[in-house]
Amino acid sequence: MRLLHTMIRVGDLDRSIKFYTELLGMKLLRRDDFPEGKFTLAFVGYTDERDGAVIELTHNWDTPSYDLGTGFGHLAVEVDDAYAACEKIKAQGGTVVREAGPMKHGTTVIAFVTDPDGYKIEFIQKK
């Protein structure tokens, strides 16, 4: 068994694809429209789906936004330099909700940003 993907629902698919590809550097792996179901699935990731887990962005055509709820935590992305990654996000209009720095009660450098729908992405700096 292996982890295939994590699915999140998004209100504006093009805006979300732009965030994940341009700000986070992922690739758009595939995009499939399902007109009869009125939804589109887009898969983004750093590697091909055969080689690693990816994110499935689900856009229901008649739903412009979602309540995030309290059950979902965040996605985590390893970065070479969390400080530089935050500066890049801010320079491109993204939102940093926790600046880079050592985690509480530890030494690992982390940061948090949000995607256009408010989902949190944790940057974990390589050791």
Image (tube, rainbow, N blue to C red):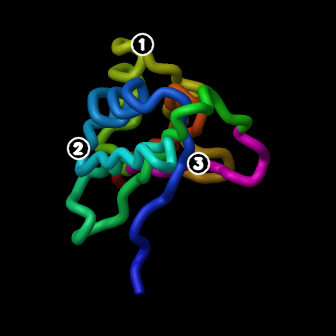
Disc number placed over residue 31 in the picture, else none: none
In x, y percent, where is residue 109? 48, 43
In x, y percent, where is residue 80? 29, 43
Residue 109 versus residue 6 in the image, above or below: above
On the image, numbered disc 1 is attached to which residue?
Answer: 93
Front residue of 74/100: it is 74
Residue shown at the point (46%, 48%) measured from the top left: 36
- Left or right of 27, for residue 53: right
Cβ–Cβ below 8 Å for labels 1 and 2?
no
Front residue of 88/28: it is 28
Which image quadrant: the N terminus? Answer: bottom left
Q: Secondary structure at mark 2?
A: strand
Magenta part of the chain: 68-77
Q: Does 74 appear in magenta? A: yes
Per the model, the C-alpha gap separating discs 3 and 2 is: 20 Å
Per the model, the C-alpha gap separating discs 3 and 1 is: 20 Å
**Residue 124 showing in the rendered view:** no
Residue shown at the point (60%, 26%) measured from the top left: 64
Q: Secondary structure at mark 1?
A: loop
Name the image quarter holding residue 120: top right
On the image, numbered disc 2 is attached to which residue?
Answer: 27
